[in-house]
Amino acid sequence: MTSARFHGTDYNPQLINWCKPNLCFAQFEVNGLSPPLVYEEEQFDLIYALPVFTHLPEDLQLAWMSELSGFLGPEATCR
């Protein structure tokens, strides 16, 4: 058994509405096109968001990278 917790967030409420009943191992939230998110500082050891950035203009990419970096805990490493 693992103590890992999984969270997902997306701009598209239809995707989140599908995830909530079908992926019971995680918690899901809808977010806006730009930050902020509802998570606490240093809450995560890993954030996966790469496919998202290719669809955003550079100013939003930078805003999201800044926002997401604040959620990485001290044990997380950037690669």
Image: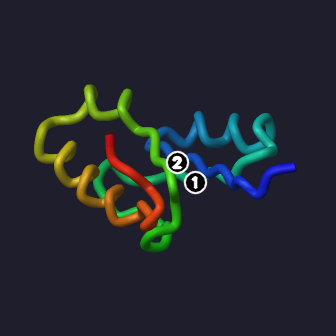
Residue sitting at the far left: 59
Of label 1 and label 2, which has the lower sequence position? Answer: 2
Which residue is nearer to you in this view: 52 or 42?
Answer: 42
Residue at figure coordinates x 48%, y 73% from the top left: 40
Q: Which mark is residue 29?
A: 1
Q: Are marks 1 and 2 in contact (CB under 8 Å)?
A: yes
Residue sitting at the far right: 1
Rendered location of residue 3, percent (x, y): 77, 57
Taking the image as shown, residue 23 lies to the left or right of residue 39, namely right
**Does residue 22 lie above or below 72 as drawn?**
above
Disc 2 residue type (three-letter): Thr
Picture quadrant of residue 74: bottom left
Taking the image as shown, residue 34 lies to the left or right of residue 7, namely left
For the C terminus, give its image quadrant: top left
Crowdedness near tag 2: few (<14), some (14–19) or many (≥20) residues, C-alpha within 10 Å? some
Residue at figure coordinates x 45%, y 39% from the top left: 48
* Pointer 2 residue: 9
Disc 1 residue type (three-letter): Glu
Rendered location of residue 1, percent (x, y): 87, 49
Q: Secondary structure at mark 2?
A: strand
Q: Secondary structure at mark 1?
A: strand
Q: CA distance from mark 1 to mark 2?
A: 5 Å
Rendered location of residue 37, percent (x, y): 42, 62
